[in-house]
Image: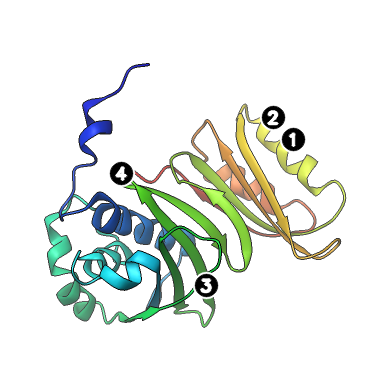
Amino acid sequence: MSISIFDVIGPVMIGPSSSHTAGAARLSRTAAAIVGKPFHGVIFGLHGSFAKTHQGHGTDIALLAGALGIREDDEQMVHAVELAKQRNLAYTFEEVELNGVHENTVQFTFFCDDGTVQKITGSSIGGGQIMITKINGFDTEFTANAATLMISHHDTKGVISKITGILSDAGINIAVMKLSRKSRGDDAFCIIETDDVLGGDIVEKIKLVPAVEHVQALNKID
């Protein structure tokens, strides 16, 4: 097995810790990308180690920078507070207790300009890597290291086969698929990771599938 030197020394980043700064910034940047629309406020709910050491390790600055779309290797990260003021972004950091999650976990609450509230939970799992574990109450498990489809739909027979058929017809290979639902016949949420980049045409075709309510494509977060 070949191992890159970057796997040993970690990611290029601003800050002292791959988990508490680089991973935190990437986690927050990914969460904002999942929201996919303008927001004017965010609550960062910090669990475990993040709750106890976020100021000393710069996790709070990294999370704020990520929410603003700033990469973990961008020197603008240290100016996150000033940039948030310029963009009129309201934010708070709170301690939360979550069950069965990684020590470096954040529960994000985004207040969007269209009046909706989006909740996303994820963890910084080491070496700058992340795991998104919950989106708006639905369990998920993806790293944003691959192109990902996020599909809200009604739990109806045949809807998943129609979606996978669209991907197959487009020559897109499914790597991982996870389905979460509230109950049989109720609201459901599907995560599909693929080996191929996802274009807007795929999203538009899936939107036309009966029972599909919302579709979003998130290509790899570098």
What element does badge 2 sit on? helix
Residue 42: where, in percent of width, then height?
Answer: 39, 77
**Are the residues tagged 1 and 2 within 8 Å (C-beta)?**
yes
Q: Mark 1 points at which residue?
A: 165
- Observer-side mark, 3 or 1, equals 3
Question: Circle 3: is it few (<14), some (14-19), or many (20+) Cα within 10 Å?
Answer: some
Give the residue type that dot 1 points to: Gly
**Are the residues tagged 4 and 2 within 8 Å (C-beta)?**
no
Q: Mark 3 points at which residue?
A: 118
| Depth order, front residue of 45/117 | 45
At a point 76% along the width and 51% down the height, the residue shown is 209
Indicate the quadrant containing the N terminus: top left, top right, bottom left or bottom right.
top left
Q: Mark 2 points at which residue?
A: 169
Q: Mark 4 points at which residue?
A: 127
User: Mark 1 or 4 closer to N-term?
Assistant: 4
156 lies left or right of 22: right
Marks 4/2: CA distance?
A: 37 Å
Q: Please identify the quarter of the rendering in which residue 82 is found.
A: bottom left
**Are the residues tagged 3 and 4 within 8 Å (C-beta)?**
no
Q: Please identify the quarter of the rendering in which residue 116 is found.
A: bottom right
41 lies left or right of 216: left
Give the residue type that dot 2 points to: Asp
Count of numbered tags:
4
At a point 13% along the width and 68% down the height, the residue shown is 79
Marks 1/4: CA distance?
A: 36 Å
User: Mark 3 or 4 closer to N-term?
Assistant: 3
Q: Can residue 195 be seen in this view?
A: yes
User: Mark 3 or 1 closer to N-term?
Assistant: 3
Q: In the current view of this chain or complex, which residue is farthest to the top?
A: 1
Residue 55: where, in percent of width, then height?
Answer: 21, 72
Classify 175 as above or below 73: above
Residue 98: where, in percent of width, then height?
Answer: 51, 70
